[in-house]
Amino acid sequence: MGRSPCCEKAHTNKGAWTKEEDDRLIAYIRAHGEGCWRSLPKAAGLLRCGKSCRLRWINYLRPDLKRGNFTEEEDELIIKLHSLLGNKWSLIAGRLPGRTDNEIKNYWNTHIRRKLLSRGIDPTTHRPILNHTHNNNNNAPSSTDVKPCNNNNSIPSSAAQQLQEDHHPHHHQAVKTICFSNNNTNNNEERKPEVVMKREEIIIPFDYHQPREMLVRPSSSSSSSSCSDTTATPDELNLELKISPPCNFQEKVNIVRHQQDFMMLQGMPSSRSSTSTTMCFSCSLGIQNGKDCACHHHPHPIHYPGTNKINHGYDFLGLKSNNTVLNLDFRSLEMK
DNA sequence: AACCCGAACAACCGCGGACTG
DNA sequence: TCAGTCCGCGGTTGTTCGGGT
């Protein structure tokens, strides 16, 4: 579908903002509030594209921004959230007050990536960088060579894979999903790594109060693809997430332990080694706002302020579910 | 002093979802 | 239902700056 340009490009400034432009933008937004970015530049007397104004305001001029270096706690929180959410910078930023998605994205690319690599962790998959090969194929690439299977919008496979390899037998059945196929039978040609998803579910247990399962399955028609299927490509992956209500208490305890093992494996702080009582995943992420907290052993109804609604379901990162399986699309989350 | 290079970050661009008539 | 529009997101690019040679 075609679209008109967002602004009259011939009459707009580009590049770095001047102090005067900043002042104009601040003054206008103070007087009129945010919004209507398309018409804002003209109304504010700025020769800028509306998108540029929005970006400048959100990433630089907003008064609630926290400038300055990231703390160690923020680093760890970003890493944990990224391992859960992938490159959903706006969602991650929503959990770091005063930080913007652009700032976090830049910080990730310049600092945290290197930090994880120095820890021996693949920043894309959050898995340890191993040198041994997968599958029975001696020519299979090392994990450091693996192209990210979650290039843009899917969550990292790390949690799924880690938990898959964990001792969770009844889940293990469903999770034999990711392998490295060799789609090139010609030994003279360079072999390229490939991640192939089978049409089976990946079940990622979260903490026991929050939704237990994240079911990841490709929705494409490549239903018969398998590890030996040489036709599927990573580009065909279309992962969708589903979350269902929690399991029974003992399972919940196991799940929390698995998460803690997972985090310990990645060098993340975990409560497991120090105490036998469990800290919920929400708290371990620093999300301790009560309704996300799962440190209580039975779910409680959530009342949403300003409404008459009481949700007896489960709330994950601000998402609400009832007793039915919840289809989760991170892009639809309302975070701010 | 001049040049090179990499790190850091601001800003741009294109795409897709939501909304509306 | 569909086309047009707006907004927000995420990837990428451009610019600046500091350190090393």
Image: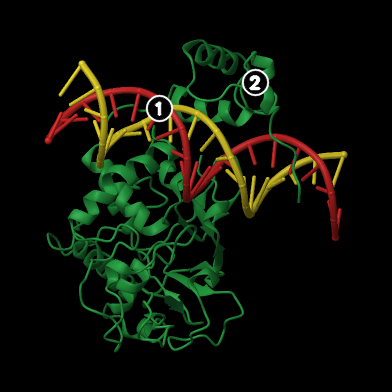
Chain colours: A green, B yellow, C red
Residue at image coords 22%, 67%: A261
Residue type, label 1: Leu
Mark 1, Cα crowd under 10 Å, few <14 / some 14-19 / many 20+, is some
Residue A295 visible here: no
Residue on which the image places disc 1: A65
Residue at image coords 36%, 52%: A81
Mark 2, Cα crowd under 10 Å, few <14 / some 14-19 / many 20+, is many
The picture places residue A134, in percent across and down from the top left corner, at 28, 81
Image quadrant of residue A181? bottom left
Q: Is residue A317 left or right of residue A35?
A: left
The picture places residue A90, in percent across and down from the top left corner, at 47, 44
Q: Nearer the viewer, residue A129 or A258?
A: A129
Q: Which mark is residue A257?
A: none
> What is the chain identity of the residue bearing mark 1?
A
Q: Nearer the viewer, residue A217 or A227?
A: A227
CA distance separating discs 2 and 1:
22 Å
Residue on which the image places disc 2: A41
Residue type, label 2: Pro
First along the sequence among labels 2 and 1 = 2
Residue A211 visible here: yes
Query: Considering the numbered disc 2 on the image, is that residue within a helix, a strand or a loop?
Result: helix
The picture places residue A287, in percent across and down from the top left corner, at 35, 48
2 vs 1, front mark: 2
Counting every numbered tag in the picture gives 2
* Residue A263 against residue A194 in the figure, above or below: above
Q: Nearer the viewer, residue A112 or B4?
A: B4
Q: Is residue C3 left or right of residue A23?
A: right
Residue at image coords 53%, 74%: A218
> What is the chain identity of the residue bearing mark 2?
A
The picture places residue A94, in percent across and down from the top left corner, at 44, 42
Q: Check whether the beta carbons of the residues at disc 2 and disc 1 lie within 8 A of each other.
A: no
